[in-house]
Amino acid sequence: MPTDTKKKPWLKQQPMMRKVEIALMPPLLGAIYFFGWRTLAIVIWVAIVGAATEYFMSKKRGDTVSEAVFVTSLLLGLSLPPTIPFWQAGVGAFVAILFGKEVFGGFPRNVFNPAIVGRGFLYVCFPTDMTSQFTPVWKGLPGGLAHWGANKVIEGIDAVSAATPMWARRDFGFETSLLDLVTGNIGRLFTDADGIQRTLTAGSIGEVSAILILLGGGYLLWTKTAQWRLTVATLAGAIVSTAFFRYVLRADAVPPVLWSLCSGAMLYAAFFMVTDPITAPKNKNAQWIYGAFIGTMIVFLRWKAVFAGAVAFAILLGNTLGPSLEMFYKARAKKQKTKATKQGAAA
């Protein structure tokens, strides 16, 4: 009997995942400009550790590495602070792939978004490095293209701080301009409500400029790579809940709608995280509820939680809710079909 001796390729080609990688290029290029070449090294390192972890696990079960591992690595790497130690970034990648995907049997069996699992683990285990090691962006030309690492000094003052736009507004009463949030031009000295001078710093390396995220996200929607209902539902949930908390409940701590959308990781989550085709529901009605729930939880947790970020935990809550929504609508459809069949038989 002839045997097939052709070697199995080590990488599973996934054209859809390649489109997500292309969509993430504007935030990645922006990260280099804003924070220097070290950010690219961090993303590459995360991809190496993630791919190696998946290769080891998939080889054990006779499978191949999915191209989705590079999407996970990009999403995780771009969600990290610019000064994060390499070893912590590597730990995050290892946890993201092993415990976020491989323990469920690999792609596409995971329940939780692997990038969020990795980031959430780092957030809980290394809160200081994940919340108080942000820096201002490099400005002008050539910006970070002429630097290895992030900008750590403004006017001779140490600029490594926790005062990102979200923290600065909530804890110190300083509101970054909407234009700066859109362009990513974040980094300056400001005086808080108590008269103390502080440094305003940018956030995670891929979440600084709203316009760059919109460019990549627009490409995803245009190519129909991402499900538009998930993005629209997330943003709609955020808009409605922001308006309700701010104008009905009179919660001044909740930022205005446009500011809330453009700050932090809101847009990054709506376009790249919530739209994960594996962890999001497939039913159209479930997608609306799923996205709206995550958008609402982001706003609520930003308002009430200790940490101002909240995006990762809101998405994990959504991932937990997603399967139940899917089962509910499947059971409902089955019940309606059975009812229609009985009525047809009776007629």
Image (cartoon, rainbow, N blue to C red):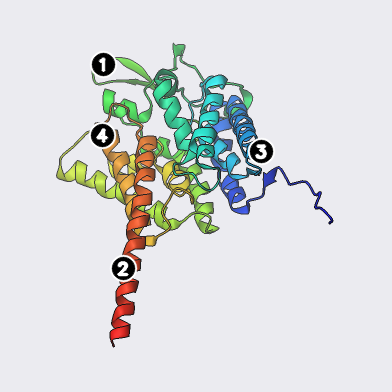
Mark 4 residue crowding within 10 angstroms, few (<14) / some (14–19) / many (20+): many
Mark 3: secondary structure: helix
Residue 186 seen in the figure:
no
Quick one: 153 or 314, which is closer to the camera? 314
Q: Residue furthest front?
A: 1
Q: Are marks 2 and 4 in contact (CB under 8 Å)?
A: no
Mark nearer the N terminus (1 vs 2): 1
Find the distance from the CA under tag 3 to the CA under tag 2. Answer: 42 Å
| Coordinates of residue 251 in the picture (x, y in percent) | 18, 37
The residue where tag 2 is placed is: 335
- Give the number of the mark in front: 3 or 4: 3
Q: Amino acid at mark 1?
A: Gly
The type of residue carrying mark 4 is Trp
The residue that mark 4 highlights is 303
Q: Is 306 located above or below residue 68 in the figure? A: above
Q: Position of residue 95 (x, y in %)?
A: 51, 30
Disc 1: which residue: 195
Tell whether 188 sits left or right of 250. Answer: right
Among numbered discs 3 and 4, the one appearing first in the sequence:
3
Does dot 4 land on a helix, a strand or a loop?
Answer: helix
Q: Which is nearer the N-term, disc 3 or disc 1?
A: 3
Residue 263 to residue 191: above or below: below
Q: Which mark is residue 234?
A: none
Q: Are marks 3 and 4 in contact (CB under 8 Å)?
A: no
Question: In what quadrant of the picture does the C terminus appear?
Answer: bottom left
Real-space Cα distance between discs 3 and 4?
45 Å
